[in-house]
Image: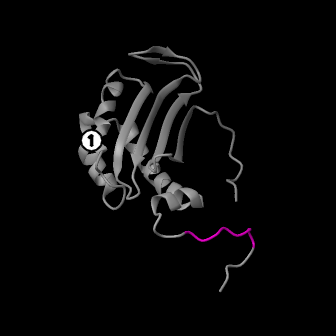
Amino acid sequence: MPLSPPVGRQLLHTRRVTCQGFFREDGLWDIEGRITDEKSYEHANEWRGALKPGEFVHDMSIRLTLDHKFTIVDVEAVTDKSPYRSCGEVAPDFRKLIGLRIGGGFHREARARLGGVHGCTHIVELLGPVATTAFQTVSSAPIAPRAAICPSRPMPASRPSGTASPT
């Protein structure tokens, strides 16, 4: 059910969060997230000067590479656009996530490793939907990738949609 029609209004700000999950040919998983913020009007920024309508205030991405146990084996974070110079300087700190497992307590431990000046608020916030995307990616993977991560357990043959499983 869609939202009800709004009263008259003017769009001022748009935040987009996009997450994608990939199965790699080496048997690992890449989960990528990107966050962008833009305004519909020109506004001043101390570091970058005047930002035109539609120009990104934030454009930040992260890639987590996971093994079959959801353990982070590699991380890459980038800040392509930000309102402060220091935002891009903390991107390498996200490698502190290597060895952490996505599961219970993940967000708490990520914030402990990357809180304050050791991380970027926006990329840390992006870890929430990235973690959810990891679970959605692995659980919905086609049979071939799932078999690759657990070759000792045969996967059921796929059936045309609408057909019942044999009993």
Residue plotted at (39% across, 53% down): 67
Foreground pick, 70 / 16: 70
Q: Is residue 131 visible?
A: yes
Image quadrant holding the N terminus, namely bottom right
Residue plotted at (33% across, 62% down): 104
Q: Is residue 145 magenta?
A: no
Foreground pick, 63 / 127: 63
Residue plotted at (67% across, 79% down): 165
Badge 1, how many Cα within 10 Å: few under 14, some, many 20+? Answer: some
Give the image quarter of residue 53: top right
The percent position of residue 131, horizontal first and vertical second, equals 43, 52
In the picture provided, is 122 more to the left or to the right than 115? right
Task: In the rendered view, tell whether residue 156 sits above or below residue 18.
Answer: below
Residue plotted at (40% across, 50% down): 66
The percent position of residue 80, horizontal first and vertical second, equals 45, 25
The percent position of residue 136, horizontal first and vertical second, equals 52, 57
Secondary structure category for the residue under label 1:
helix
Q: Is residue 141 visible?
A: no
**Residue indicated by mark 1:** 96
Task: Check the image and name the residue furthest to the bottom.
Answer: 167
Q: Main secondary structure of the magenta part?
A: loop
Foreground pick, 101 / 13: 101
Q: Which residues are magenta?
A: 155-162
Mark 1 is on which residue type?
Lys
